[in-house]
């Protein structure tokens, strides 16, 4: 327990082990799909069923409800990518990745191919979100619109989302 006062303008050089400095970027998690997810409704925001956790430092991600509810207040960097597939080439018109905060759209990224439809696209979205550490949560949605209204899906290989607390 000694206290050392470092005067203003001084430089600290450490050649040994340091502890107690800075902070950690937790709670943090990253999740992905365990398999391709069929999208039942054309052009409707659909929650991404990311049931496979790559990591979850504080058990704040629920892989049954696909919701991140950290019990630590702060600012969080939230990110996600959904790979949207149409059934056939030249069928995909619109694809979106969407972050929800509680029950509302918070940030939205969209690719619009209506004048020249494609088949696959992976829009990414990210945001810094204030969460209160008790009741606030974030969720991740995608939206696919295809010309024939059939065969929409989220591809498991390139669909993921996550979040981590940022130091402020």
Image: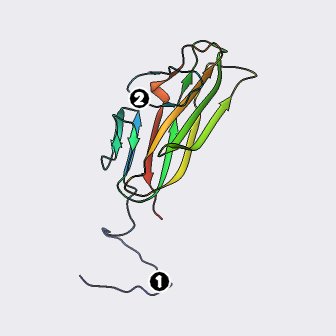
Which is nearer the eye, 48 or 163? 48
Position of residue 18 relative to residue 121, above or below, is: below
Relative side of 103 to 108, left or right = left
How many discs appear? 2
Query: At which x and y percent is residue 136?
Result: 43, 51
Mark linked to residue 86: none
* Mark 1, secondary structure of its residue: loop
Checking the image for residue 33, the label placed there is 2
Ranked by sequence position, the earlier of labels 2 and 1 is 1
Instruction: Give the secondary structure at mark 2.
Output: loop
Q: Residue at x 39, y 52 (%)?
A: 135
Q: For the view shown, which residue lies furthest in the left direction? A: 1
Colour style of the rendered protein structure = rainbow
Q: Given this view, does label 2 or label 1 mark the residue nearer the observer?
A: 2
> What residue is shown with label 1?
10
Instruction: Kindly check if marks 2 and 1 are in contact, taking CB atoms under 8 A apart as contact.
Output: no
Where residue 129 appears, x then y in whole percent?
Answer: 51, 53
Q: Which residue appears at 56% of the width and 35% of the height?
A: 97
Residue 4 left/right relative to 123: left
- Quarter of the figure that contains the N terminus: bottom left
The percent coordinates of residue 58 (x first, y second) are: 31, 50
Horizontal and vertical percent position of residue 140: 48, 38
Residue at 38 percent of width and 45 percent of height: 29
């Amino acid at each position: 327990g000694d206290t050392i006062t470092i005067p203003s303008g001084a430089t600290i050089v450490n050649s040994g082990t340091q502890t107690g400095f800075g902070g950690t970027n937790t709670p943090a998690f990253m999740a992905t799909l365990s398999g391709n997810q069929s999208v039942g409704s054309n052009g409707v925001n659909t929650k991404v069923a990311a049931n496979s956790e790559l990591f979850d430092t504080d058990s704040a991600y629920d892989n049954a409800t696909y919701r991140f509810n950290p019990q630590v207040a702060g600012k969080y960097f939230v990110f996600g990518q959904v790979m949207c597939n149409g059934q056939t080439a030249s069928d995909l018109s619109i694809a979106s990745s969407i972050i929800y905060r509680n029950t509302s759209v918070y940030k939205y990224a969209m690719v619009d191919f209506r004048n020249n439809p494609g088949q696959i696209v992976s829009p990414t979205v990210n945001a810094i979100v204030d969460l209160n550490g008790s009741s606030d949560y974030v969720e991740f949605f995608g939206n696919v619109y295809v010309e024939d209204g059939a065969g929409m899906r989220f591809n498991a290989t390139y669909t993921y989302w996550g979040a981590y607390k940022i130091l402020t």
